[in-house]
Image (cartoon, helix red, strand yellow):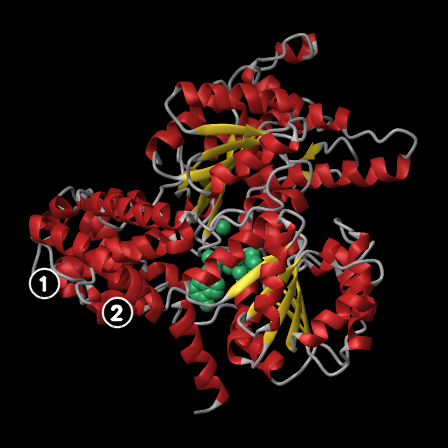
Amino acid sequence: MSLKQQIHQALQHHFGYSQFRLSQQQIIEAVLDGNDVLAIMPTGGGKSVCYQLPAVLLPGITIVVSPLIALMKDQVDGLLANGIPAAYLNSSQSQAEQQNIIVKALNGDLKLLYIAPERIPANSAAFFDFLRKINPSLFAIDEAHCISSWGHDFRPEYLKLAVLKDVFPHLPVIALTASADDLTQKDILEKLALHHPQVFVSSFNRPNIYYYIRKKKDALGQMSKYLAQHPDDSGIIYTLSRASTESLAEKLRGQGYMAACYHAGMDSGARNRVQEQFQRDEVKIIVATIAFGMGIDKSNVRFVIHYDVPKNLEGYYQETGRAGRDGLRSDAITYYSAGDIMKLKGFITIDGNPQQTSIARKKLDQMQEFCESECCRRQYLLQYFGEPAPAYCGSCDYCLSSLEEKDVTIDAQKLLSAIVRTGERYGPAYLIDLLRATGADKILPAHKELKTYGVGKSLKKEEWQWLVKQMLQNHMLARTDDQYGTLLLNDKSRSILKGEIAVKLVMKKENAEAQEEDAVYEKELMKTLRQVRQEIADAQHVPSYNILADSTLADMATFLPQKPEELLLISGFGDYKVGRYGTAFLKAIKDYCASHNLQSRMPLVKTKRERSTAPKEKKLSNTMQVTFQLFQDGNSIVEIAAQRNMSPTTIEGHLATFVENGELSITKFVEKDRLATILQVIKQSGQTIALKPIKDLLSDEYTYGEIRLALAYYKYVN
Ligand code: ADP
Ligand code: ZN
């Protein structure tokens, strides 16, 4: 068997995954080839497997240095749950416990030994002697940025690792981190003195995290609505002040949620308790200041909410990154208000350090720009971190909110006329006030006599702002470069004023909130599976997600496996777990299927396996696959909608995707003649985004459903 096949088999057998993520495979190959490696991967990217899998295949023991004590126990529990002998040594253990583990290590009974850096004594010779005796074959340095004083979390104990390569020159070292700018990266390589290191930097894109920025109006109300729709989910809510973590947690408990607060003002005992309860799912929601999260390795965090806007995009990325480590869809929601930014601006003044203050301010400005920008959030974020990204991700509020094209000629003319009548001397804020007859004391008396005064009341301030922005982008308007941003006319504006050209702009649909995808799994079954998992976890005294991740439960509740062989095809089930827990889960699934008259959907599983990082594949999400299968089985749109408790429009949308990629023939939905007519009208309308303009050009007998599907076909053939 080739090395490739061998590591692939080990991934399936020991960890229950059928595919590698990001650069896991290359990293593992490099390590097994005996190379020193620096692996930079985003949080949740799957760094652990990069050393755990080699540890299983290599003879002897792998030493893992990790600074996060809470995380260590978790990792070891996870390994044990997969049948891999592992242990840890840290200051939380008694002398006897530590001795016991040392004996195990000396006897060669362990594959992995986790060690906290503070366990390495100042006189490290004796320690390295011990290491030599237990015959290590690999060193893994987790959170490797802690060795660098350039990083954001410097830990002097890490510097003791600098002699590692002197003592064990022939053993490979793998250093892992989620955050390393160039400087830190170089520093890690130097301090650890890695030999010809291979460096792997993975994309920072987290495709399973959906980004939403919401205007903060009544944040508690907005949030309650979200939580009510996700009652079983676990999540983190970040606020900026200790007081508000407490009051918010209190309010949520009042609403019946298992919520707790966490902030730096609590004593460490209380903090650890909360953290542990969260890990064990005894607390579902943590309301925290940014102090929370560094040691959190909970894979099933389904949402991260920023109740207050964070201070910079680095923090935002890191905090939102705590969601969805299991690769399952998760939401990152930020409630944003310009007022909050103003408040923060006051906070971040760093006394006596104008330079740092100015950097912090700049970062805050960028945060604001991110929240206010009218473009794909993911693109903005990735570009901020220096990674190229497409303009459309399909999974952020901007990309999801439906846009529609509108004729706004009249409004544009009102704006232009206000500019002309005030002598091209004002910026958008004044002009919008003038049009809406607001901010009366600011408006010059003479301007109140103008015909345009107050003619723009029908649009909201934000709508005028959007219009201005769009007109500028489309060169229908000009602007001075100075700080005033005075609006000026150009040739195109003059043609608009004369009515020679119409202004059609893509406008945000009113109240268009991004649609959230319906959960595809059987919700009731999911609940039962959670219970089964909880029982197993309780019996073994480990957090439930160490038994199986939420994503694995969701896969079971989607694909309904009936036999152990089928269970093996579910991501997260290796041989060991199937043997140990398979029966209990299969029974629950079979009972559910029998009482609901459902069949296994395992033939669909292939797509799930290919659930990879490419956003394109989102198009064929599981929920769509289920619809597709039901349609192929001969059910009508209405029947599928009824069965799945979804609207026919949603089902049509699913099927349209398959028409668009050519997997379903349009003839199943629209008659030939009617199709020809609709296609012609699509061309005539000159756009393929909005359905309404097309519908308006057709007689009433054509339905939106037909138009939607015909449009999909149009995209397929064009
Ligand atoms: P990191 O340390 O990079 O933050 P972890 O190693 O904790 O990430 O992995 C995050 C989650 O992804 C864990 O639940 C892990 O079991 C899971 N995971 C890792 N590799 C894979 C893979 N190849 N396929 C599916 N899930 C994986
Ligand atoms: Zn997007």
Q: Is residue 78 visible?
A: yes
Q: The C terminus appears in which quarter of the rendering?
A: bottom left
Does ligand 2 reach within 8 Å of label 2's beta carbon? no
Foreground pick, 594 / 363: 594
Dot 2 amino acid type: Gly
Which numbered disc, 1 or 2, marks the residue closer to the eye?
1
Foreground pick, 15 / 456: 15
Foreground pick, 322 / 398: 322
Dot 1 amino acid type: Asp
Residue 539 at x, y percent in the picture: 34, 48
Question: Quick one: which residue is furthest to the right in this view?
Answer: 352
How crowded pointer 2 is (Cα within 10 Å; few <14, some 14-19, many 20+) is rated as some
Q: Can residue 679 be seen in this view?
A: no
Residue 305 at x, y percent in the picture: 51, 36
Q: The N terminus appears in which quarter of the rendering?
A: bottom left
- Please give left or right for residue 447 compared with residue 164 in the image: left
Question: Taking 433 as reference, is 357 above or below it?
Answer: below
User: Looking at the image, which residue is at 17% across and 60% down?
Assistant: 675
Q: Name the residue under label 1.
A: 633
State if disc 2 and disc 1 touch (CB < 8 Å): no
How crowded pointer 1 is (Cα within 10 Å; few <14, some 14-19, many 20+) is rated as few
Residue 269 at x, y percent in the picture: 61, 32
Residue 76 at x, y percent in the picture: 52, 58
- Please give left or right for residue 40 compared with residue 676 in the image: right
Q: Which mark is residue 662?
A: 2
Question: Taking 312 as reference, is 340 above or below it?
Answer: above
Q: Find the distance from the CA under tag 1 to the CA under tag 2.
A: 18 Å
